[in-house]
Image (spheres, rainbow, N blue to C red):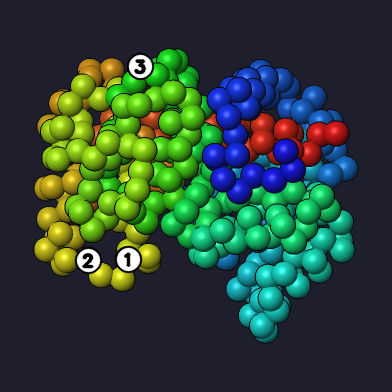
Amino acid sequence: MKHLYDIKQLNAEQLNHLFSLADKIKTTAVTETKKWLAGKTAMALFFENSTRTLMSFQLAAQRLGMDFCALNIAHSSAQKGETLKDTLFTLNAMQSDAFIIRHSENHTQKQAAKWLGDQASVINAGDGTNQHPTQGLLDLYTIREHKKDFSQLKVAIIGDIKHSRVAGSLVDGLHILGNNNTWIYAPDELLPASTTARKAENMKQALSDADVVVMLRIQKERISQIDAEVLDHWHDNYGLNENNLEWAKKDAIVMHPGPMNRGVEISSAVADGPQSVILEQVRNGVLMRSALLYQLLSD
Ligand code: CP
């Protein structure tokens, strides 16, 4: 595989292989992993803001000995009208092995992969409302650390599902790994038109006996219209707090891809509480992105 623009490119065996690679990286000295991709280069083109994804890709690349450059889009020639295709081929002439791209338009990275072909790898760091495959990978890896058998789990994903590329990749990844008990809950206008997940009628149905609870923020930047009433009462109707978390299993884990809106989709007591694995997700992001870079770029 040369590129990763959609988690659905991976089957269960390939997902499990990436998890094993991440396990190996976790237990290997950095002085050793720094030899694995020494001499290779990754470039990041983030047309949307990021804290976790950008920084963890940089760390992941550096832990494998790679050179890493991030183009500052706001100060780049994209602002003078240079097209994405010209930007990519310009940077490719500097001989990058991988382009890690975040973009507001769905399927941009798939298009970039077609343009570049075998010349360099394209990795999707989030495209519009479509996919965020490396977030999906780190979410699945985090679940695997706590829960092992994906087919036996009830997973509840609550929040703005329709505009969430995180939900898109996670629902697909869970399905690939044999989970048929993924539930989504949101106001009707924030549910996707089609999904392999089950749609819950209310918070209680979504959370009851859940093993994994994933909370999502409202993607206000992608929402053209939403009832102000719905937003005003979001926490009461769609927020996770210490009371409604009791509907889930006692050992349920609580996840959030970040950034969080504390007091909106999740209370601080839960976000910082004993069931939260939110910072583990962040830590696993470096491991899973290292595993993916190694898988795509090692000869
Ligand atoms: N989860 C995630 O994509 O976070 P960032 O936007 O900070 O990269």
Name which residue lies at 86% across and 61% down. Answer: 94
Label 3 residue near ligand 1, CB within 8 Å: no
| Image quarter of the C terminus | top right
Dot placed on the residue nearer the N-terminal end, 3 or 1:
3
- The circle on residue 152 is 3
Q: Which residue is mark 1?
A: 223
Residue 57 in percent (x, y) is at: 64, 45
Label 1 residue near ligand 1, CB within 8 Å: no
Above or below, 248 relative to 217 = above
Mark 1 neighbour class, 10 Å CA radius: few under 14, some 14 to 19, many 20 or more:
few
The three-letter code of the residue at mark 3 reads Gln
| Residue contact at pointers 1 and 2, CB within 8 angstroms | yes
Dot placed on the residue nearer the N-terminal end, 2 or 3:
3
The three-letter code of the residue at mark 2 reads Ile
Above or below, 163 relative to 287 = below
The three-letter code of the residue at mark 1 reads Ile
Could you say which quadrant of the image residue 284 lies in?
top right
Mark 3 neighbour class, 10 Å CA radius: few under 14, some 14 to 19, many 20 or more:
few
State the separation of the CA atoms marked 1 and 2.
7 Å
Look at the image and tell me whether residue 286 can be seen.
no
Residue furthest bottom as drawn: 80
297 and 242: which one is in front? 297
Q: Is residue 82 left or right of residue 280?
A: right
Look at the image and tell me whether residue 223 can be seen.
yes
Above or below, 7 relative to 73 = above
Residue 164 in percent (x, y) is at: 39, 51
Q: Which residue is mark 2?
A: 226
117 and 253: which one is in front? 117
State the separation of the CA atoms marked 3 and 1.
34 Å
